[in-house]
């Protein structure tokens, strides 16, 4: 991997020098770079597949060993319980919980009601002042 990175860094510098001289080598360099990039991508994909297959086999072997131990000692396999209605996902969460449609509608209704009450005290103040003047 380090060789690849070093080659990329040196290759970029060589390309800039070649660009000063002419574009003849640039076309060949692009083709080689594309072929090399495709080969590297293919090698990465194959390595990832081999790694996944290796881990899958290891997990199967482990599960067989676990099952033999369970059979030997008469243990029951633990079943993962499904989370109930709604787990507490707020733990460690940055931000707040998203509101549901019902909560948003209720909040909008509250704001409408608050506007009616906001008008009421201004009228009382005017009424109180007019009585004190008489």
Image: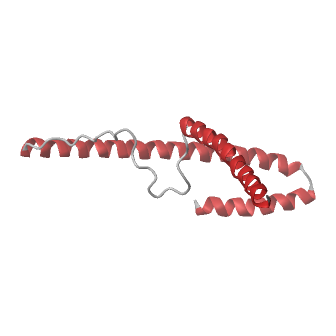
Furthest residue toward front: 134
Q: Is residue 79 left or right of residue 9?
A: left
Quadrant housing residue 43: top right
Quadrant housing residue 79: top left
Q: Residue 93: percent from the left, percent from the top? A: 50, 56
Q: Is residue 34 above or below residue 93?
A: above
Furthest residue toward left: 73
Q: Residue 52: percent from the left, percent from the top? A: 42, 44
* Along the line of sight, the residue nearer the viewer: 70 or 88: 88
Q: Is residue 11 left or right of residue 20?
A: left
Q: Residue 16: percent from the left, percent from the top? A: 84, 60
Of the 4 image quadrants, the one containing the N terminus is bottom right
Q: How many marks?
A: 0
What residue appears at the point 28 percent right and 41 percent down from the top-left corner? Answer: 81
What residue appears at the point 90 percent right and 50 percent down from the top-left corner? Answer: 23
Q: Is residue 26 left or right of residue 7?
A: right
* Along the line of sight, the residue nearer the viewer: 130 or 29: 130
Of the 4 image quadrants, the one containing the C terminus is bottom right
Q: Residue 94: percent from the left, percent from the top? A: 54, 57
* Along the line of sight, the residue nearer the viewer: 50 or 84: 84
* Along the line of sight, the residue nearer the viewer: 59 or 44: 59
What color scheme is it?
secondary structure
What residue appears at the point 56 percent right and 55 percent down from the top-left corner? Answer: 95
């Amino acid at each position: 991997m380090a060789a690849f990175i070093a080659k990329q860094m040196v290759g970029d510098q060589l390309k800039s020098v070649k660009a000063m001289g002419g574009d003849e080598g640039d076309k060949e360099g692009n083709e080689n770079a594309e072929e090399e990039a495709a080969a590297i991508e293919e090698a990465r994909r194959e390595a990832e597949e081999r790694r996944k297959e290796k881990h899958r086999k290891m997990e199967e072997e482990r599960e067989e060993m676990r099952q033999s131990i369970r059979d030997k000692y008469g243990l029951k396999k633990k079943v993962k319980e499904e989370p109930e209605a709604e787990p507490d996902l707020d733990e460690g969460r940055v931000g707040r919980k998203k509101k549901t449609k019902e909560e948003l509608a209720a909040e909008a209704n509250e704001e409408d009601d608050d506007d009616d009450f906001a008008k009421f005290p201004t009228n009382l103040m005017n009424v109180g002042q007019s009585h004190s003047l008489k």
